[in-house]
Image (cartoon, grey):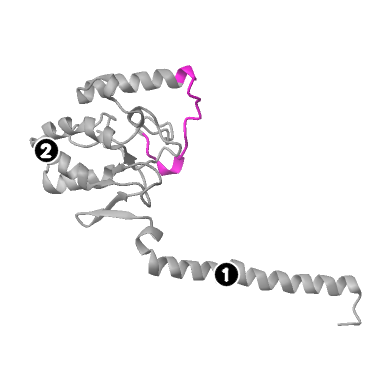
Amino acid sequence: MNRLPSFVRQHIVALRGLLVFTVLTGIAYPLVMLAVAQVAFNHQANGSLVSYKGRTVGSSLLCQEFVTAKGAPLAQYFQPRPSAATSGASNDYGCDPLFSAASNLGPNNQTLVQEIKQRQAQIAAFDHVKVSAIPPDAATASASGLDPFISPANAAIQVDRVAAARHISPAQVRVLVSTYTQGRTLGFLGEPRVNVLLLNIALDEQYPA
């Protein structure tokens, strides 16, 4: 090898390094991480999928629309945040993981201002609450458009409507809301939140509409 020109030797050394690091970082490391994830975090590594009556109905990490075929919200279910994650098709009402996105409209954008006012009016009529009682997350979309959570305040304004649609008492609904309310991560990160999909499944299990 010493008889080879120096630039050839340098390329051979570089090729060896490339092969070694390709095996280490491109094959060995991903396989180790995959094995650790499957053993230690199997549920999360496989998408945090949620099953109901023997079939997968969604992921606890992604929002889901609870609407009729024409997009009208179903009164017997808690409703998620508005979602800009949509293909734009007439039958796509948001929470589409293939189109995760925000509206990218600034807080002073008149289009966004009008959308928020329209949403507030719809929520006020649907949940029979005052506009002043509607929390911000009920009328604004998340950055991803796929937020699976709503605030406890958002859940609270929906309790009476869900209870009436299922012919149960608001107190029974509040118990389930409390059960599916998660606290701050590590006790200080983020805000308390309610997982809409898990809450709605619990409602179907205990109080079928």
Residue 173 left/right relative to 120? left
Count of marks placed on residues: 2
Residue 191 placement (x, y as % from top left): 36, 41
Q: Are marks 2 and 1 in contact (CB under 8 Å)?
A: no
The disc label shown at residue 27, or none = 1
Disc 2 to disc 1, how far (Cα)? 54 Å
Q: Going by the picture, which residue comes out furthest to the front?
A: 188
* Amino acid, disc 1: Ile
Q: Nearer the viewer, mark 2 or mark 1?
A: 2
Residue 60 lies, in percent from the top left, at 32, 49
Which quarter shows the C terminus?
Answer: top left
Span of residues in magenta: 94-111
Could you tell which of marks 2 and 1 lies nearer the N-terminus? 1
Residue 208: x, y in percent?
12, 43
> How many other residues sit within 10 Å of disc 2, few (<14), some (14-19) or many (≥20)?
few
**Residue 54 in the image, given as x and y percentages of width and height:** 21, 57
Provide the residue designation for mark 2.
171
| Residue depicted at 64% across the width and 68% down the height | 22
The answer to which image quadrant residue 141 occupies is top left
Point out which mark residue 83 bears: none
